[in-house]
Each structure stands twice: as C-alpha cells, then as structure tokens.
Amino acid sequence: MKIELGQTGDYAVRSVLALAVAGRRLKGREIASQMQLPEKFLPQVLATLVKAGLVGSVAGPDGGYLLTRPPGEITLLQVVEAAEGPVRSRKCVLRGGPCRLDGTCAIHDAWFDAQAALAAKLSRTTFAELRRQALR
C-alpha cells in the first residue's frame, strides 16, 4: 500500500508552499515556474484552493494568487483535503463497505487509529513550518 498524494494534491501543496515562501501575491506562471508545475493544469488546482477559502485571486494585469490567511493558520491537512477529499476513509478495508455495517472487522481499530494519527500530524503541520524548512 502506498500513502501518497495524487497529482492534484501534490500541485495544491506545492502551490500553497510557493505562496507561503513568497509572502506576496504570485501569478500562476510564477507558481508553475518556481514549483515546476504544468501551467495548463494549475488554474484548476488554484480554483479548488480558492473555493476552499485557502487562496484568494485578484484579476487583471497586476493580479495573481495569494494566501487568505497567514501561513501559520493554514495546515497541510486543510490543503490536502481541499484537493483530495477527506484523509480518513469510512470504508472498511476488509469488507469494502462502511465499517460497522454488520459489525466491526478485525483490523478496524488499528486501521482507523493509523488514519487518525496521519490526520492529526497533517493538522499540526502548518505552512509556516513548511516555509521555514523550504528556506533552509
């Protein structure tokens, strides 16, 4: 099993990191260039972040994208879930349906505890911390 971001999640995290590091409004092409992202797909990713309220956009020749809050108030969990949906699954690993539908499976507690730990770590990780790491 792999625990990894999909393409949209990857691009979303890198976009928010670029904005956090810059500390100012950036054009989409600047984000794409700095983070080595395809310019063509980036507006869709940024629109998702705008819809989630994490990024704002300003139209026009002097426009661009900016964080709506300080980087210390935006968590990795918020960005990942905005792009990819909930980190925690309600689906039973063994049965394929909702857990507890007809009883708890044998690995329920271990699996859901692991998901909770991942979500907790992502929710404690802010883009201010990631910015500091990126600037080292």
Image: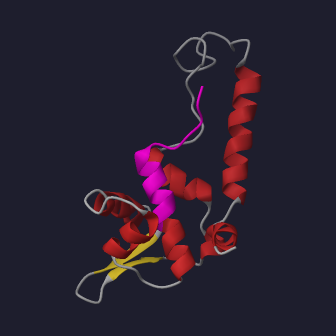
Q: Nearer the viewer, residue 36 or 64?
A: 36
Residue at 61% across, 20% down: 99
Q: Residue 47: percent from the left, percent from the top?
A: 33, 63
86 up-or-down from 10: above or below: above
Q: Quadrant of residue 74?
A: bottom right
- Is the magenta region chiefly helix, strand or loop? helix
Can residue 38 be seen?
yes
Q: Is residue 44 left or right of residue 126?
A: left
Q: Quadrant of residue 76?
A: bottom right
- Image quarter hosting the N terminus: top right
Residue that lies at the very extreme toward the bottom in this rendered image: 62
- Image quarter hosting the C terminus: bottom right
107 up-or-down from 113: above or below: above
Q: Residue 41: percent from the left, percent from the top?
A: 29, 56
Residue at 57% across, 32% down: 89
Q: Nearer the viewer, residue 99 or 28?
A: 28
Tell me, yes or no, whether the highlighted magenta stretch contains residue 7: yes
Q: Nearer the viewer, residue 128 or 113?
A: 128
Residue at 56% across, 57% down: 78
76 up-or-down from 32: above or below: above
Q: Is residue 32 left or right of residue 61?
A: right
Can residue 69 be seen?
no
38 up-or-down from 22: above or below: above
Q: Is residue 117 left or right of residue 94?
A: right
> What span is colored magenta in the figure?
1-15
